[in-house]
Image: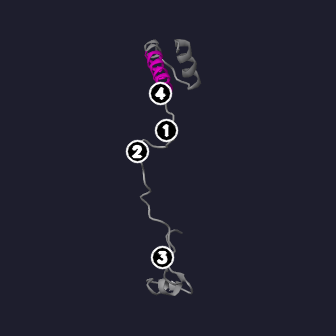
Amino acid sequence: MITIDTVRHVAKLARLRLTEQEELLYTEQMGKILDYFDELAAVDTTGVEPMSHALPLTNVMREDEVEVTLTHDALLKNAPSTEDEFFRVPKIGE
């Protein structure tokens, strides 16, 4: 059972300043939350596999596959400006 002292203690740990009305409200709300956990604990889950999501999820990302890429020379051939084996870009700062 949640008491107002418990709510005050949690608020202190969280560094929250609560009004008396908030303390009463949160005492009631936290009590309802814990009551619901008791209700859930009473449910027979024998044979139910643990899961991370309520709905089945599939990976929407494609598999990583090795692909042939352009060669260094082919990449430099398309560059507007090169210097030796590098891309040449305009100077940005001083």
Nearer mark to the viewer, of 2 and 3 = 2
Look at the numbered discs 2 and 3 and tell me whether their residues touch, using CB distance below 8 Å: no
Q: Three-letter amino acid code at disc 2?
A: Leu
Q: Which mark is residue 43?
A: 4
Residue 39 x %, y %: 46, 23
Residue 45 x %, y %: 49, 33
Which of the marked residues, 2 or 4, is nearer the chain's N terminus? 4
Q: Three-letter amino acid code at disc 4?
A: Val
Which residue is denoted by mark 2 in the rendering?
Answer: 55
Which of the marked residues, 1 or 3, is nearer the chain's N terminus? 1
Which residue is denoted by mark 3 in the rendering?
Answer: 90
Asked whether residue 27 is drawn in magenta, I would say yes
Which residue is denoted by mark 1 in the rendering?
Answer: 48
Of 94 and 2, the residue lying toward us: 2
Nearer mark to the viewer, of 4 and 3 = 4
Q: Which residue corresponds to the image point at 42% horizontal and 48% vertical from the top-left?
A: 56
Which of the marked residues, 1 or 2, is nearer the chain's N terminus? 1
Of 21 and 90, the residue lying toward us: 21
Q: Secondary structure at mark 4?
A: loop
